[in-house]
Amino acid sequence: MSDMITRIKTPVRLEYGVYPGSHYTTYLNALAQGRFVGGRCPESKKVYVPPRGASPTSGQPTDEIVDVQDSGVLTTFCVIRLAFPGQKMKPPYCFGAIVLDGADLPIYHLIGNIPYEEVRMGMRVKAQWKPRDQWGPTLESVDFFAPTGEPDAPFESYSEHL
Amino acid sequence: MSEPLSAPYLLQFTYNRTTGPVIGRFLTGLRDGRIEGVRTKSGKVLVPPVEYDPETSEATTDFVEVGQAGVVTTWTWVPAPRELHVLKTPFAFALIKLDGADTAMVHVVDAPSESAMRTGMRVKVRWAQERVGYITDIVCFEPEASS
Amino acid sequence: MAENCAIIGIGQTKYAAIRKDVSLPGLLREAALRALEDAGMTFADMDAIILGTAPDMFEGVMMPELFFADALGAVGKPILRVHTAGSVGGTTGIVAASTIQTRTYDKVLCIAFEKQSESDAMWALSPAIPFQPQLVAGAGGYFAPLIRSYIRRSGAPEDVGMMVAVKDRQHALKNPYAHLHVDETMETVRNSPMLWDPIRYSETCPSSDGACAMVLVNEKIGKAHPKKPAWVRGTAMRTEATFFSGRDQINPLAGRECAKDVYSQAGITDPAKQIDTAEIYVPFSWFEPMWLENLGFAEVGTGWKWTLEGKTKLGAELPINASGGVMSTNPIGASGLIRFAEAALQVRGQAGEHQVDGAKLALGHAYGGGSQFFSMWVVGDSPV
Amino acid sequence: MSQPIAIVSVAQLPSIRRDRTRDEAEMVQPIVTEAMQKIGLKQADIGFTCSGSSDYLVGRPFSFVAAVDGLVTWPPIRESHVEMDGAWALFEALIRLRHGDIDTALVFAFGKSSLGPIPDVMNVQNDPYYVQPLNLDSFSQAALQARAMIDAGKATERDFAEIVVRNRRNAKSNPNAQVKGDFDVEAILAEKTISSPIRKSFSPPLSDSCVAVVLASGDKAKKLVKRPAWIRGIDHRIEPYSLGVRDLTQSVSTRIAAEKVGVNAKKNDIAEIHTPFAHQEILIKEALGLDSSVVVNPSGGALAANPIMATGLIRFIEAATRIHAGEANRAIVHATSGVTMQQNLVAVLEGE
């Protein structure tokens, strides 16, 4: 007998549809208009970005849609130095958690316009929107967040978002 | 409420599987133009071979070569093949008990029409010209009489 | 009055980046047979099988418990398949123990596995889904910011993460089943590439093929067993949402409450004193100090001191992950059950070279998702 | 002996072909809330929560995590998940309740069958070495079994059509059913086959839905509702994997489970059985040993509504609903999993 078969390749190829729910759709549509929106929990009054079908603390939908700012505080981050498939930026680059002004929990996005070794927790950042004709129902309407140059937020002001 | 957003999403991946000794030996046999099954303790010949006897859960180790033709034990005619089916023209899926085997294997039958199919009919292997050690080294089965 | 649950069989595969010699069912079979042999039993003796694994997409078989019916001797029997993300291995053990404690079954086989070499973990864990934020961070991108937060909050020196990696890899050298057998030093960790700053390559877990199985039985069978069993003294699970306003992601309440629950069942009031060793789920080295605090071993903000002072090494005060832990072996779906099994090995005195002397009470811990799913058990060398 | 356990509340999102506006949390939230609110409970009153679902329906890993976002998880909850039909989630919850330290459990299942190519998705349940490369789709899987039954003299295509007509007529009174009405046997038989002898009408619809059940034990159950649906027995079994080694005209695992729970120890009023394809009803009725007086699938069954991964749990819901209302006193529940019903669960519910 010649060499034994020990490995085989088996493909899987299935095409699905993706339909973001109504709360998330509201968020995506706002991004297509160059805005960020959140949804307010009717009990805790906290603003969720994106809005949610259920607030984890009350179980109720965050149906009250409110505008939040496109600037906020970088609460924490990491520097990605590893190359992997599907990557949009060339390592090293920075990725972080941003609590937008008016929101009560962070969103995650890239941090740019600053050497990565100068990125700090508490830094004030603002969305760098793509040109208007490139806005769409996606967070990619924003290229990245960049420092505003304002003074850093004190640790205590954002420590509950870590 | 505006139109719901939607987008297609392709779940696509090619798995790289290790076969272990039993499946590997069966697939090696296919590559070499041979069909092998395993004989269980109770004397049953399982084709295709499974690693563990469904009746006793014992590991199977006793390989036996079986025939390249056999009997259709049940079947279904697929008049409009789906994109992922291996045959592009109407065909049958069938369970086929090969000569010398006690269990049936799933494969496809290339028959001229549904009316050519019946339970109990004899079919034989049509080998691929180039074989690599994969279940589709058997391109399909075909009615024995039509050869 | 709940039935006591005894662990009388433990089986693990040799873990590796790729197990080329076995099929998918063959991998599970290896662990299952070793557990049964340890228990002096066969598949025919089992009343039911509880199976755990992480997403089906790792192996590309939907609901693989169906596929494994023959390999696990399940034909004609009940088989249940649990999936609670990274904590699934732990949950598998807990559900299995529950079936014994509630006298639903007398003897069960529980098994968890992952054969990560069949696919690509990065793909299977985070495919690019439309409308979702793009894959900009990879697997460690989620946890690296949390680790930075922990470092900032606790003031821990940078060395701590490296020390955990060195300690766990040195422990793994004493565990014949461990995937990574490397002579790790502070230098090798420091010199390894920075992947997700502050996480270096050597401060992350590997991707492994492997399975782990246990045979769990009722008190009567456990007491009659010739080898010393481990006894389940408490089990607990807790869940909280991935993201909500005010969530403490570094020290999640779900983990704290889960620990409190399992300790109270086991009569533990001072875990650091009463627990002899713990197997905790540490996929990135910094999670050791974080979980030491979350589990109540160390005061909040001081977990890193335990590592720094060498208290978590084999032979020291509270050996953590004497087996080498997830840092040395990580078949994702099995990793939780391996923690539970290693805890059981310790109280049975069966851990071989990585045995913690005189271990009588041990904790097994698993977590999953965004630090949101927790499962834990405490095992002892005697029943309640 | 642990306390008896009962279904005390149920809720269903009506099955529809495509739900394009709700994500997992938006499906789960209203339904679990409804199931709890009906009996005056909220998440904090629930001792244990367990769900059933499959990632392959959605096409992405950890889909259950998104469903957990539909729950109140603060303070943290005791929660688990099975990658199986919700009927098995109910089984896990039942075992958890038997500990006796808690007295309520929430079980839910969600199925969005509209997102992927289900016939091909179900091929991923097949043997990855021998069968997956051939793409044995769900219609063809069922057809191999239906043909075997015809060949064995157990049924005819007309029998299949009559089963479809009866189920979909029953579904007319089911507000949650998707395909219902008066259908014609001859018209069904005149349909083209997809995988012969399977026609579209012999097949289940594909549905999007989410369903929930609240379980309670002993006195708690009696306090919560007038007439709990007591789960008197529950058992499930599996068969060999390969199609070619099984007798596809028998449901051996159903028969074992039925014996374990004592299906025919008393007179049964109704049976809710999980038989997506028409021919499977014949198999399961036979394996359960039901006599002709038992009303099978008064809800219309899986042929009327089929949110995959929730369809089995719906059988519990439909049976319990009739017991709660006093329309039935003893009901048999069946759920299935796997290619050509490899794994089967049987339970007995009683009102008294």
Image (spheres, rainbow, N blue to C red):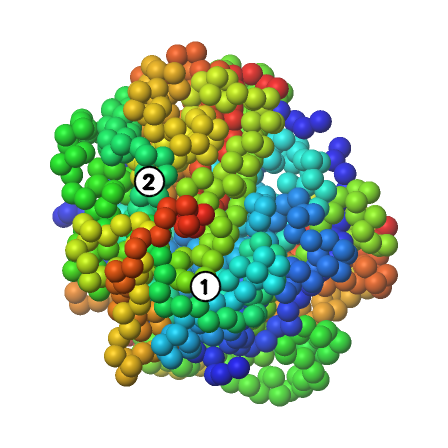
Which label is found at residue C152? 2
Judge the density around disc 1: few (<14), some (14-19), many (≥20) Cα neighbours within 10 Å.
Answer: some
Q: Looking at the image, is B85 positioned above or below residue C240?
A: below
Residue C302, image quadrant: top left
Image quadrant in which the N terminus of chain C is located = top right
Q: Looking at the image, is A33 positioned above or below residue C176?
A: below
Judged from the image, the secondary structure of the residue bearing numbered disc 2 is helix
Res A85 visible: yes
User: Is residue C329 shown left or right of residue C235?
Assistant: left
User: Is residue C265 shown left or right of residue C343?
Assistant: right
**At which x and y percent is residue B11?**
34, 66
User: Is residue B20 shown left or right of residue C63?
Assistant: left
User: Is residue C178 shown left or right of residue C64?
Assistant: left
The residue indicated by pointer 1 is: A102
Residue at horizontal 52 percent and vertical 26 percent from the top: C378
The answer to whether tags 1 and 2 share a subunit is no
**At which x and y percent is residue D68?**
53, 55
Q: Which amino acid does label 2 sit on?
A: Arg
User: Between C248 and B31, which is closer to the camera in this rendering?
Assistant: C248
Res D154 visible: no
The chain under label 1 reads A
